[in-house]
Amino acid sequence: MNTRGNDALRDKLASEYVLGNLRGGARRRFEALMYGDAALRMLVKEWERRLLPMHEFVRAQEPSPQVWRNIEMRLHLKPERSSWHFWRGFGLGTLSAALAAALVVAIGLQHLRGPSYDLVATLTDQQAQPALLVKADTGKRLLQVHIVGGAPVPVDRSLQLWAIPKKGSPRSLGVLGSEGRATFSLASGAVGDDIVVLAISLEPRGGSPDPNGPTGPVLYKGPWVRAM
């Protein structure tokens, strides 16, 4: 699917994607295009701004408990309570939405990540909108971060990536630059059964002055997903 130079087709596909009319392979191919096309991602966000407010006029439907159990089983996750204060404020509803978003993006990126990346995380905001993609190669000990959305970062601030364990202090995984993507060495303690979630905080330029955790607000969160 090559849409460059065809504005009408790109606009139609973006609207169909937001409406949920793209299914199966077509949806996965479109997500692959968004991954490397910032202009297309902005077009999707524009359609979201147009269409998502219409949700206010639709009566909410509560998913059955089996839906969330299936998501947790698919992601190989067990519900856990973190000992860290900001994670306790992360509601169950937001977590469920984030897990669903993580599953969708992980499947969509399956053929992009290459054979070596065995873990993927989608970090979302409080509205469960994807903002960053994180990929880990545990064999080569590499960590890649790609910004796919979210608000612009002030020039005097930095985004910092953290792994939040069940017990103990958050573990810094790296400070992002302004390029929109970064590659780090995979730090010890970045992955494992004790990691509840990854998080991005907004810090002073260069990173948190406190080695024990964020000093600024936590903007995005999301769990690791094993690549399929």
Image (cartoon, rainbow, N blue to C red):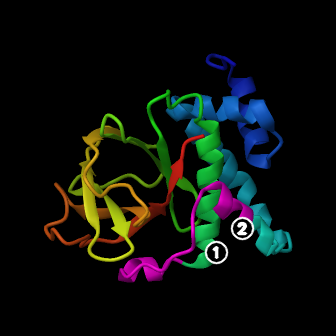
Range of residues picked out in magenta: 68-90
Judging depth in this view, the residue of 31 and 197 nearest the camera is 197
Q: Quadrant of residue 16?
A: top right
Q: Left or right: 145 with respect to 124?
A: left
Q: Residues within 10 Å of mark 1 (few under 14, many from 20)?
A: few
Mark 1, residue position: 93
Q: Give the quadrant of the N terminus.
A: top right
Q: Residues within 10 Å of mark 2 (few under 14, many from 20)?
A: some
Mark drawn on residue 68: 2
Nearest to viewer (mark 2 / mark 1)? 2
Q: Residue type at mark 2?
A: Trp
Whichever of labels 2 and 1 marks the residue nearer the N terminus, that label is: 2
Q: Residue at x 24, y 51 (%)?
A: 175
Q: Residue type at mark 1?
A: Gly
Q: Could you say whether the residue bearing mark 2 is in a helix, strand or loop?
A: helix
Q: Could you say whether the residue bearing mark 1 is in a helix, strand or loop?
A: helix
Looking at the image, residue 226 lies above or below residue 113: below
Q: Residue at x 73, y 46 (%)?
A: 18
Instruction: Give the x, y percent position of residue 9.
Output: 74, 25
Confirm whether residue 210 shows in the render. yes
Q: Give the quadrant of the C terminus.
A: top right
